[in-house]
Image (spheres, rainbow, N blue to C red):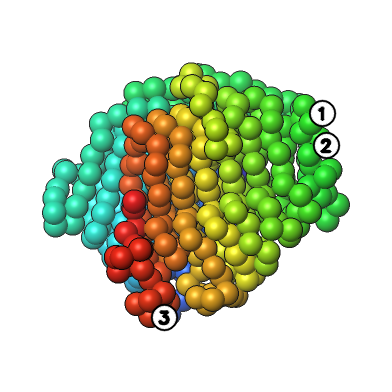
Amino acid sequence: VQAAGLGQVPGDVRINGAVQSISSTTENKVTIMFWRSAENFSVSPRDASKPIYWAVSQAAPYRRMHIRGDLQFDLGGWASGGFLANSIVEGTAGLTSGQQWFCRNVELGEWIGGNWNRTFVGSSGTPAETWPHAPTTIVDSTPVIRDKPFLVIDDAGEFSVFVPSLVKTTHGVSWRGGNEAGMRIPISDFYIAFAEKDSGKSINSALAAGKHLLLTPGIYSLDQTIRIRRPGTVVMGMGLATLLPETGKAAIVTDDVPGITISSLMVDAGLQNSPALIQIGDIDSRMDHSENPTTLHDVFCRVGGAVPGRADACLVVNSNNVIIDHAWLWRADHGAGAEWTVNRSKNGLVVNGDDVTIYGLFNEHFQEYQTVWNGERGCLYFYQSEIPYDVPSHEAWRSKSREGYASYK
């Protein structure tokens, strides 16, 4: 589920009530509350004495929001989130039982609560930094970011996509005052894809003709890899559009070119093993893209869970200077095909490029290293990871002469 305001700033779309996620599970456990997002709203609670709830765990970003009250990220039961970015919460925000949370470029009245791990980058209203008990990490400014593109409608009813500019050393939200730097791309420059009629071939034909890509909600069964070759191409999903490679290839492969933006997508592994589900650049990538990096926002991969699937790795980053702004890479520990010999996958993330920056990496249950980072000068802000629960024996979980695999190598 994705809820998105269509204004240039959050205050253009005003909700009196709530834009929220509430659990209906027993004991208010939200560790299965995944794959939902809300962005670009101003929300005024009807009852100022009660918080709005965004009770979620992984793959549930809350972005570009202006909450004119309090915001709570759990309901007192199990919770293992989450991601808040480029948002203002005028009242309190925080956790009671939730294990961890990540905030980037947020302005809070006050943060309260939490257990294992809270990380704040470029944010205000944060708690004091603490370690090692109930650790809280504070990074004063966000070193480099291009915020996520978003859909806008104007007074004449015309749609466009606004792509924020790359900015460095920032603190707080990008949209205060309504003068955010960026470019507006008319919807006529996009190929609008539909799962019931489009294939990898038709999408690639549109990209080769110079179009950007907007994927409407649905599951896209791909007969070939989507190839992104043109610098500055914008690929944007709606409603967590899902790509499913059917022939043992990657779902998306980019050339080593600057300024590509990929956002709001799910990729499911197919029955035939893919070497990677998403690949940014080729293995010989050497270019410096520091002035116009490729950025990924809210990109989620599953190996099993929805359908049985296999992939050597979910996300492979070969290009330099790539920015990843929230990813959940998941080898399923429940759901369809969630068995050691069925949903086979070695790694969630492999980084071969230099100067790669990641904000909010959730990476779980893969059968070797969860994260393999070979590139130089990389930066990762907030890491949530679990090694696999379903290892059948010591022999099945060995790295050469060592027993087991580190989560982060």
Q: Mark 2 and mark 1: span between their CA atoms?
A: 6 Å
Question: What is the three-letter code of the residue carrying label 2?
Answer: Ser
Q: Are the residues at dot 3 and dot 2 in contact (C-beta closer than 8 Å)?
A: no
User: Callout 3: 10 Å neighbours few (<14), some, many (20+)?
Assistant: few
Sooner in the amino-acid sequence: mark 3 or mark 2: 2
User: Callout 2: 10 Å neighbours few (<14), some, many (20+)?
Assistant: some
Residue 224 vertical placement versus 143 (above, below): below
**Residue 73 in view of the camera:** no
Percent x, y of residue 146: 49, 29
Q: Nearer the viewer, mark 1 or mark 3?
A: 3
Q: Are the residues at dot 1 and dot 3 in contact (C-beta closer than 8 Å)?
A: no
Image quarter where the N terminus lies is bottom right
Residue 120 vertical placement versus 355 (above, below): below
Q: Quadrant of residue 44?
A: top left
Question: What is the three-letter code of the residue carrying label 1?
Answer: Ala
Q: Are the residues at dot 2 and dot 1 in contact (C-beta closer than 8 Å)?
A: yes
Residue 176 vertical placement versus 339 (above, below): above
Label at residue 205? 2
Farthest front residue in view: 401
Q: Residue at x 64, y 24 (%)?
A: 231
Judge left or right: residue 94 versus residue 196.
left
Percent x, y of residue 288: 49, 22
Residue 80 vertical placement versus 371 (above, below): below
Label at residue 301? none
User: Callout 1: 10 Å neighbours few (<14), some, many (20+)?
Assistant: few
Label at residue 392? 3
Q: Nearer the viewer, residue 182 or 356?
A: 356
Q: Nearer the viewer, residue 287 or 154?
A: 287
Percent x, y of residue 91: 32, 45
Tell me the residue that label 1 is attached to: 209
Looking at the rendered structure, the secondary structure element under dot 2 is helix
